[in-house]
Image (spheres, rainbow, N blue to C red):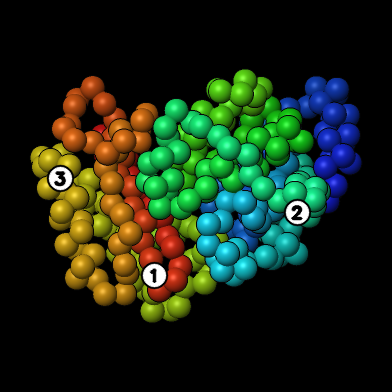
Amino acid sequence: MKNFHNKTELSTHISALKTKGNLIGFVPTMGALHHGHLSLVNKGLSENDLIVVSIFVNPTQFDNKEDLVKYPRTLEADIALLKTVSDDKIMVYAPSVEDIYGNQIKSNAFTFDGLEHEMEGAFRNGHFDGVGTIVKRLFEIVKPDSAYFGEKDFQQLQIIKKLVELHHLPVKVMGCPIHRADDGLAMSSRNERLTSEHRTIAPFIYKTLETAKIKFGTKSAKTVTEWVEKQFKKQTLLELEYFIIADIKTLKPVKRKSTQKTYRAFVAVYADDIRLIDNIALN
């Protein structure tokens, strides 16, 4: 498995591969890899000749400095896990902060037709400027034919599609289904930090989403939202930050259901100081 820490060396290697007609897929990650990431890699390998997996904890998308410090960094274990998928068709790009940002660690300002102001954007100041900055730079370095993102971060997926559209970037953005543990918990690098008590109760998040989906078939969005909020008030180990039912195109909260629109329910929850997000398609 080829490992790169320098963007120039990676770009040169990829250019040589592409001149030979190879299709390059890309899975950007912040490391602490799990089977959810591997599902993206496998999807990418099924559609491309080679895959680049970036492993980079991006400082500009953290609004909470303590969360940045605590974010797990497990490069050797990540590489070992990737080798269980393929040793010769995966390239790892694990740059330093300096390799990405030089001497100025700051994000650029982006607009994404308002998508950036909803949900995560409303609760995490500057988050999507950081996401836009790092993804655009990685696309420019890797120059992939296709890039793969999990639907757990559905808002991020929609924003990256908008980034590609607005900046005319030559990459196809592919959304992949949420990979879940057997008990329903959406796989996340943050799950490793959960206490045993919080890990036991965390599947409550997805179970509540499943019931909300059923209720949405016959109830209004307002009624379903109020029901979810009541369920979390009964669950003292989990603190609900938000539950929102939104139009998947605009990400704006639904006021009145329409059969012409597609909706998704989004949730953000704190388990002690660990923030977990999830979502589910409603129709």
How dense is the environment of label 1, judged by Cα within 10 Å: few (below 14), some, or many (20 and up)?
A: many
Instruction: Name the mark on residue 222.
Output: 3
Tell me if residue 125 comes above or below residue 248 in the rendering. below
Q: Quadrant of residue 213?
A: top left
Tell me if residue 4 comes above or below residue 249 in the rendering. below
State the separation of the CA atoms marked 3 and 1.
25 Å
In the rendered structure, the answer to whether residue 1 lies left or right of residue 201 reads right
Disc 3 on helix, strand or loop? helix
Residue in the picture at 29% in, 30% down = 262
**Between residues 103 and 1, which one lies in front from this camera angle?**
103
Counting every numbered tag in the picture gives 3
Residue in the picture at 43% in, 45% down = 121
Q: x%, y% of residue 28?
A: 64, 45
**Can residue 180 be seen?**
no
Q: x%, y% of residue 70?
A: 59, 70
Q: x%, y% of residue 12?
A: 88, 34
What residue type is disc 3 on?
Lys
In primary-sequence order, the first of circles 3 and 2 is 2
Instruction: Name the mark on residue 271.
Output: 1
Residue ID for mark 2: 97
